[in-house]
Image: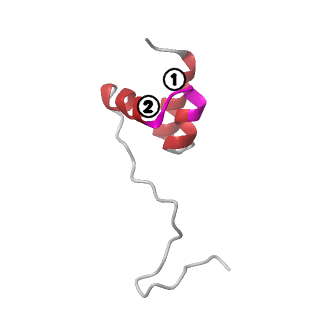
Amino acid sequence: MHTHALTTAMTLYRSGTLSLSEAAARAGRSEAELLAALKQHGIPVREESGTEVRSGTGTKVGAD
C-alpha cells in the first residue's frame, strides 16, 4: 500500500535531501521496509557513511 508519507520520503531520498534513515523515519517505516520500497520502484540506493571524509593519507579534510 502506498501512502503519501512513503511517496514523499522516497522522493526526498532520491533527490538527496534525506538520508536513508531520515527517509525511513519520515515514512514511518523501518530502513528495511524503505529499502524494499525503493527497490520495488527502481530507485537506486546510495552508499552512505556516518564517518568523516579523510584524505588519502588518513588526515581529516576540513573546510577551514
Q: What residue type is labelled 1?
A: Leu
The picture places residue 37, in percent across and down from the top left corner, at 38, 27
Earlier-in-chain disc, 2 versus 1: 1
Is 64 covered by the magenta stretch? Answer: no
For mark 1, give the secondary structure: helix
Magenta stretch, residue numbers: 25-31
Q: What element carries label 2?
A: helix
Q: Residue at x 39, y 53 (%)?
A: 47
In the picture, the disc for residue 34 is: 2
Mark 2, Cα crowd under 10 Å, few <14 / some 14-19 / many 20+, is many
Q: Judge whether 55 appears above or below 21 on screen.
A: below
Tell me: residue 20, above or below residue 27.
Answer: below
Residue type pointed to by label 2: Leu
- Residue 35 image offset from top left, x and y in percent: 38, 35
Contact (Cβ within 8 Å) of mark 2 with mark 1: yes
Which numbered circle lies on residue 6?
A: 1
Residue drawn at x 58%, y 34% is 25
